Image (spheres, grey):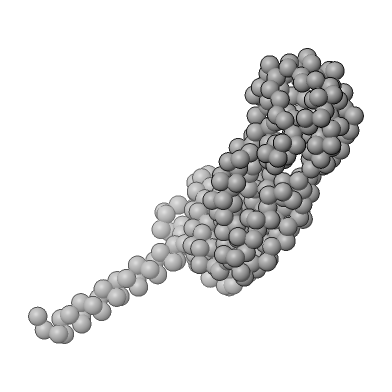
Amino acid sequence: MPLQFWLDNAAIQAISFNYGYQIMSDRLTGIEVFVRALRLGSLSAAARGMGMSAAMAARHLGALEARLGITLVNRSTRRLALTEAGAAYLDRAERILADLGEAEAEVAARTVAVEGLLRVSAPAAFGTRHLAGLVASFARAHPKVIIELGLNDRFVDLLEEGWDMAIRIGRLPDSALRARRLVPVRASLCASPAYLAAHGTPRTIADLAAHQALGYTLSPHTGVSHWSFGTDGDVKVPVNTVLRVNSGAMLVEAAVAGLGLVYAPRFLTAAARAAGQLVAIDLDQPVMDLGAIHAVTHPSRHPAAKTRAWIDHLARAMPALAADW
């Protein structure tokens, strides 16, 4: 075929593509004008937010209504009033724009370099015993990330306090935060060999009444007056605490020193048990299922690349770390 035919055909295809793109772009702009106008209360406010004139915004809304063949909004000089059809369309339109925004954010997040300040909150005892190696290996893989690690046993407010993510342990309450389960958490009841030699080894939950307990003040299940047994923690056992403290690490050290029984996550007692400093005790009721270690982030579906990289690193590394717990 003649060269001119191919050139003409290519030009027609390019014009068709550009025309189709323009129609799609105008359609999305019309939808955004409609949604913004209803959110902000006026077409002029929507126009300002989108960087266009009020007349242009009105044209986009008019084109949207013409394409649909319905009136979405009744306009007056003072207010906009949704029609019945407009109310139904608004719900779908908001979802379309939200999905489009999330899709764009996801693609953008995948192209952003893993760099910058990463602020991580974690429980004090867990962080002290187990995070140093994980932080070091992450830093080697991502040298442009600076990690600020806040070790605190209280539940920090991620948004208010500016944390990128938090490591949280246990059964999480319902919230808008997004949580990724990393590894399960098992409990252990332990005492030092010296304590057991002096006081005997409890065999039943009833035996605990005759023993010295070390209570964690921040837990309702391993606390200062009652300990919870049974997988779901539904068996409440009164205990006599001789030490009440808000530090899990301190409780373990006190137990190693022979002060009493400690009821704590296995990740806190693992090293002392392996060294023979603590002995695990089995009773006639199972220890409580403490849930899991979670990586918790903001409600946004697409955290920054540095945050996603850190959480992926935890998910890969922690199962091997937890194997000895």
| Image quarter of residue 15 | bottom left
Given residues 277 and 320, the one toward you in this image is 277
Q: Is residue 130 above or below residue 225?
A: below
Given residues 94 and 316, the one toward you in this image is 316
Identify which residue is drawn at 51% across, 45% down.
88
What is the count of numbered marks? 0
In the picture, measured across the screen, residue 174 lies left or right of residue 30, that is right
Q: Please provide percent x and percent y for residue 296.
A: 65, 48
Identify which residue is drawn at 59% across, 72% down.
51
Farthest residue, direction left: 1
Q: Quadrant of the C terminus?
A: top right
Q: Please provide percent x and percent y for residue 251.
A: 82, 37
Q: Is residue 219 above or below residue 211?
A: below
Q: Please provide percent x and percent y for residue 273.
A: 70, 36
| Image quarter of residue 278 | top right
Given residues 217 and 105, the one toward you in this image is 217
Farthest residue, direction right: 242
Q: Quadrant of the N terminus?
A: bottom left
Q: Please provide percent x and percent y for residue 72.
A: 51, 52
Identify which residue is drawn at 59% across, 51% down.
314
In the picture, measured across the screen, residue 317 lies left or right of residue 244, that is left
Q: Is residue 283 visible?
A: yes
Q: Is residue 169 above or below residue 151?
A: above
Given residues 79 and 138, the one toward you in this image is 138
Q: Is residue 179 visible?
A: no
Q: Is residue 201 above or below residue 34?
A: above
Identify which residue is drawn at 60% across, 46% down.
321
